[in-house]
Image (cartoon, rainbow, N blue to C red):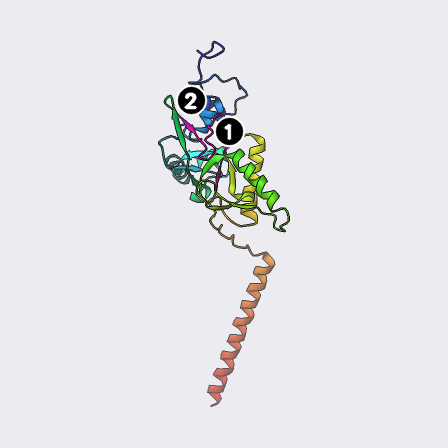
Amino acid sequence: MGNDGGTIAKRQDILSLHNARSAHTAFAEDKGESKEQILLQSCALSGLPLYENNPIVGDFKGKLYIKEKILQYMLDCKLDKLKRQLQFQHLKSLKDLQTVKITWDVINDIAHFQCPVTKELDYKASYSYLRPCGCVMSYKLLKELKKSLKSLKSRETSTHIEAHCPVCNHEFTFDYDLVIINPTDKSDFSEFNEENYEYLRTVLHLSHAKEPLKKKKKRKSESEDAEEVKDDLIRKRKMDTDDGLETGKRIRA
C-alpha cells in the first residue's frame, strides 16, 4: 500500500506511463523512491535498472541507456525503419551517444546515484555529465564552479568558460560540454541541453560524442549542371577540331 492507501507503483508502471506522456502525476513510491529517482536510475529505452548493467551511455537530451539495449534498438531500426520510435529518432549511430561514469551508493539494497565530489545522493540533487569524459556529478556543483570561474575571468574577452572536471581533471567547456540528466523532461533542462547541442553541431560541427560531422555534399543547381555540361561539350569540340587539324597535316605531308 502507498501513503494514500493505494497500490504502490512499480518501476515498469512508472516508466510505461511516463513514456506514454500520461497526464497522471500522482505516483506512489516504490520502496521509498520517487518517480524521478526511478526514471533516473533506469534505462530510458528498456526500463531496466542501470546499476550493474555497464556500460551506460547518454544522449544529448540527458537520457541514459544500457548500451547493449540501445545498440540493439539502433540495429533493429536499420533493418526495419517501422521500429523507430519518435522519442529516440535522434539516435542513429554511436556518434549520438557518450559513455557515462556513474558513482553508486547502495543503501538498503537500493542503488542511488552519488556525486563523487559532494557525496549528495540522487534524491537530493539534479545530475549532469560532461561530454569529454562522461563523469556524472551534481549539476549544482558545476553551476557553482562556473559562477566562481566567471567572476575570476570577468575581464577576459573570451565568452567561453573552460575548466577541468572535478572528478578526473579532464578539460571541458561549460558552454557546450555539459549535459543535464533529464529523465522527466523538465522544460528548462531540455532547453539548456538543446541549446548546447545546437552550438556543438552548427558552430563546432561536432557530434554529441564530439566527433567531426560528415560534410554534406553540396547539391549542384540546374544552372550549374547545365554550365558544366556546356563546358564539357566545348572541350570535346575543341579536341575534335584539334584531331581534325592534325589528321589534315598528316595527309598533306
Give the residue at mark 2: 11
The residue at 57%/49% (across/down) is 203
Residues 176 and 93: in front is 176
User: Which residue is depicted at the point 52% across and 35% down?
Assistant: 141
Q: What residue lies at 42% left-to-right and 31% top-to-bottom?
A: 43
Circle 2 packing at 10 Å, graded few (<14), some (14-19), many (20+), is: some
143 or 1: nearer the viewer: 143
Q: Which residue is mark 1?
A: 125
Q: Given the current orientation, which residue lies at the most extreme top position?
A: 5
Residue 49: tell me if it is visible: no
Say what amino acid the circle numbered 2 marks.
Answer: Arg
Using the image, tell me which numbered label, if any, was put on residue 135: none
What amino acid is at disc 1?
A: Ala
**Residue 61 x/y as whole percent:** 51, 36
**What's drawn in magenta, residue-wise?**
111-130
Rate crowding at label 1 as few (under 14), some (14 to 19) or many (20 or more) other CA atoms within 10 Å. Answer: some
Q: Is residue 216 left or right of residue 45?
A: right
